[in-house]
Amino acid sequence: MEKLMLGVIGDPIAHTLSPLIQNAIAEKLGIPAEYGVYHVPLADLPDFVDMAKKTLRGFNITIPHKQNILPYLAEIDDYAAGCGAVNTVRIKDGKLHGYNTDGDGLRMAMAMNDIRMENNRILMLGAGGAARSICRKALELGSSVTVLCRNPEKADDFRTFGASVGQMTTENISCHAETAGIIINATPLGMEGIREDFTDLSFLDRTKAAVVDIVYKPAETTLLKGCRERDLTCMNGLGMLVCQAVYAFAIFSEAEFDLEAMAGHVMDVVSKVIYGKTNHKEN
Ligand code: NAP
């Protein structure tokens, strides 16, 4: 079988979990693969693309190149075009085809926790790149989305998609949390290495929503600890990280396999490495 030549690009890129995840999938499927980590400053992107066209079957993309790659694509799928960002590139006949697997990744991770992104009422905190991909997917699936962020004037495109946008204040969060079916934190609040965190979790006392924190390190953020103490259904961002990667591998390899079963396997592998334990469901 021909070796699948893959990789990931970003700047910085040193701490990426992509090789661990993609190699775990390839190994489980018995597909020979080589996965490279490419530190690509913006000025080197044209040279990387030339090299990739000649040698790679595809690559994952992380910050800051999810938008920078757009001019190099021969084709982009509708959802990725709507997000204005690509995290997965498949190379066919020397041409780059762009995809974005974040929305489907989170949808699958949520479904694995019995939380439905479809036809729900979603309160989204944050209006960055991840929020944009999730918001578009949720709207596509018939949900309504209210986005609360600290600079609503920067979130006009969310209104264009069909989301409501407001200021992220304690009062607004509480008010929207009361009627939300799902609350998604798409800010870095509570993330390891970031000083800022949620300081007022009183909104959790006024909601029955399932809470999704897309931060995955630490395994239990302040927000998720608050949910656990109140018996609210909740999950961290590891599932999104793994499921978007499983979708990406399916695109690269064109192999048919059970995506959810694979995601469960890979979550165990990654949990062991980053949390030191395998039972991710308890995180
Ligand atoms: P981003 O594009 O930089 O967006 C971050 C958003 O959070 C922006 O709306 C930003 O507001 C807001 N924000 C930052 N600090 C804040 C604070 N102190 N209070 C309120 N809002 C704040 O980042 P991203 O790529 O969307 O990522 C967001 C988070 O999700 C990160 O923690 C990232 O690690 C995580 N993530 C996880 C996955 C996964 O697979 N699990 C995937 C992608 C991202 P401004 O625009 O006003 O700065």
Image (cartoon, grey):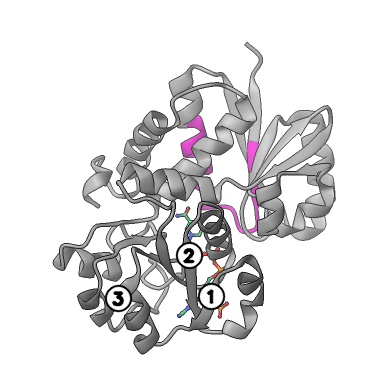
Q: Is residue 65 visible?
A: no
State the residue position of label 3: 178
Residue 19 is covered by the magenta coloring: yes
At a point 46% along the width and 42% down the height, the residue shown is 243
What is the three-letter code of the residue carrying label 3? Glu
Is 165 left, or right, of 216 in this rendering? right
Image vertical order of residue 76 relative to residue 188, above or below: above
What is the three-letter code of the residue carrying label 1? Ser
First-in-chain label (3 vs 2): 2
The alpha-carbon separation of the residues under discs 1 and 3 comes to 16 Å
Which segment did they paint magenta?
A: 7-23
Contact between labelled residues 1 and 2, with CB atoms less than 8 Å apart: yes
Picture quadrant where residue 207 is located = bottom left
The alpha-carbon separation of the residues under discs 2 and 1 comes to 8 Å
From the viewer's side, name the closer residue of 94 and 14: 94
Picture quadrant where residue 219 is located = bottom left
Is 102 left, or right, of 270 in this rendering? right
x then y, percent, for residue 279: 23, 41
Image vertical order of residue 240 relative to residue 139, above or below: above
Q: Residues within 10 Å of mark 3 (few under 14, many from 20)?
A: some
First-in-chain label (1 vs 3): 1
